[in-house]
Image (cartoon, helix red, strand yellow):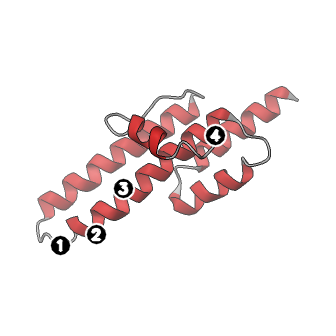
Amino acid sequence: MKDNAEKQNNTLAIVSYITLIGTLIAFFMNKETRNPLVSFHVRQALGLWLLQMILGYFIGAFDSWMISMSFWIFFIALFLYGIFGAVGGKMNEVPILGPLFQKLFSSID
């Protein structure tokens, strides 16, 4: 039984990184069980998605493929780091921005 619950928590942690809708699904499915691993990854994913949308709006104003590609590679690397941490069941903060996201979204528990 515990193994099944642990597997579901890892799945929810992974789902939180797959689109913003996946983050919302993981958040609402975690509301009743309140698993710290899922909450951690929901905070990380929510911060990444919101920052990507906000910065993407401003990056779109530049007419440079080099700036756009650098932006996408940066965020793909951060999302992959978060996904690999979720697959391993670890609470690794995203480099540079992770502590900020944990503090900013601390109300998500």
Task: Give the mark, 2 or 3, whose residue is nearer the N terminus.
Answer: 3
According to the picture, the residue beneath numbered tag 1 turns out to be 61
Q: Quick one: quadrant of the C terminus?
A: top right
Q: Secondary structure at mark 1?
A: loop
- For the residues labelled 1 and 4, the Cα–Cα distance comes to 35 Å
Q: Within 10 angstroms of label 3, few (less than 14), some, or many (20 or more) residues?
A: some
Q: Provide residue 39's location: percent of width, then percent of height.
A: 62, 41
Mark-to-mark CA distance, 4 and 2: 28 Å
Q: Secondary structure at mark 2?
A: helix
The amino acid type found where label 2 is placed reads Tyr
Spatial CA distance of label 3 from label 4 is 20 Å
Q: Position of residue 91 (x, y in %)?
A: 53, 29
Task: Say few, some or many: other residues with alpha carbon within 10 Å of mark 1 (under 14 / 14 to 19 / 20 or more).
Answer: few
Between discs 3 and 4, the one toward the N terminus: 4
| Nearer the observer, 13 or 98 | 98
Residue 59: where, in percent of width, then height?
21, 65
Q: Position of residue 46 (x, y in %)?
A: 49, 52
Nearer to me, 85 or 36: 36
> Which quadrant of the structure image shows residue 87?
top right
Provide the secondary structure element on which disc 4 rests. helix
Disc 4 residue type (three-letter): Val
At x 60%, y 49%, the residue is 15
Check disc 1 and give the amino acid type. Ala
Q: Secondary structure at mark 3?
A: helix
The CA span between labels 1 and 3 is 16 Å
Residue located at (45% from left, 45% from top) = 104
User: Which residue in the protein does label 3 denote?
Assistant: 51
Q: Are marks 2 and 1 in contact (CB under 8 Å)?
A: yes
Reading the image, the residue beneath label 2 is 57
Per the image, the residue denoted by label 4 is 38
Say which label, 4 or 2, has the lower sequence index: 4
